[in-house]
Amino acid sequence: MFTDITKHYNHFRDRINEAVLLTDPWPHLYITEVFPAGFYRTVCEFENIEGIEPFEEEGRINYPYNGDSEYDDFTAKLFSLLAAKFEYHTELPVPATTNFWTDTDKLLINDIQIDAFKDCTFTLSGQVYLPVDTSQRHYGTILYSYEGNDIKQHARQDPGTAHPHTAHWEHKDKFKQVRTVPFMPNTMLVTTNHIHSWHQPPCILDGDIRKSLMWRWKV
């Protein structure tokens, strides 16, 4: 059962503490062996979790998971560990929202973007990649650096957001593709809503399915 995840806190703590903050092209974490090996299959089969009601949004099948207070305490402790890697600290408990995603070639979310939410000042996103093997390693998140000199011209800013957050397609040449994070089994990419953390989801080929778990913490 997915609720058993709270029993594996020590495993998560050790994997996070051992992770090294990467800085190219901007600060992020890439954590391997996120789940205990025997528990990974349970996570990959999230469609079978009782009580989840999927819905489609922009071509993505979203499976939201709402845990109990014990689960919230668990994800709040994960936040403290992860946020410390980015030198962010708060005394407030910050539980995560949990969404499992299934992406196909119908996915409409393909912009070069940074996270910019209207309802918070700090966001931490942890996307756990859930492929069954290594054959989809090319479907990882693409990381960019901004090479232009007028971000307000080259990217869109929505009302209520703190900064421009979506690259204009006609100015995509101002954003340099630096690397693609490998979409490997049981790994997690952790990013913040930093003004430089430009990234893009991959283009999914017809017939392929890209599965992941998104933990998102908002302060």
Image (cartoon, helix red, strand yellow):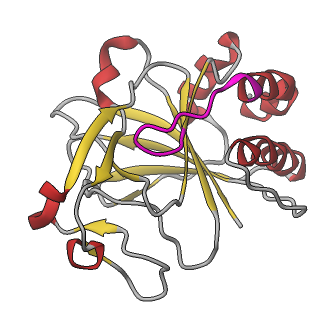
Which image quadrant is residue 20 in? top right
Of residues 31 and 34, the one nearer the viewer is 31
Give the farthest residue toward the front.
149
Q: Is 171 rendered above or below residue 203?
A: below
Point out residue 58 in the picture as x, y percentages from the top left corner: 31, 60
**Number of marks present in the image shown:** 0
Q: Is residue 133 left or right of residue 156?
A: right
The answer to whether residue 22 is magenta is: yes
Q: Is 56 rendered above or below residue 3?
A: below
- State whether the magenta stretch is mostly helix, strand or loop: loop
Point out residue 40 in the picture as x, y percentages from the top left corner: 62, 19
Which image quadrant is residue 156 in? bottom left
Q: Is residue 150 left or right of residue 45?
A: left
Which image quadrant is residue 182 in? top left
| Residue displayed at 26% across by 50% down | 107
Point out residue 179 in the picture as x, y percentages from the top left corner: 31, 33
| Residue displayed at 36% across by 39% down | 141
Point out residue 116 in the picture as x, y percentages from the top left corner: 48, 69
Give the farthest residue toward the bottom.
159
Q: Is 47 rendered above or below residue 162?
A: above
Of residues 62 and 151, the one nearer the viewer is 151
| Residue displayed at 77% across by 49% down | 67
**Start and end of the magenta stretch?**
17-28
Q: Is 51 rendered above or below residue 90?
A: above
**Location of the C terminus (image quadrant):** bottom right
Of residues 217 and 167, the one nearer the viewer is 167
Of residues 100 and 124, the one nearer the viewer is 124
**Location of the N terminus (image quadrant):** top right
Q: Is residue 133 left or right of residue 155?
A: right
The answer to whether residue 129 is magenta is: no
| Residue displayed at 46% across by 45% down | 26
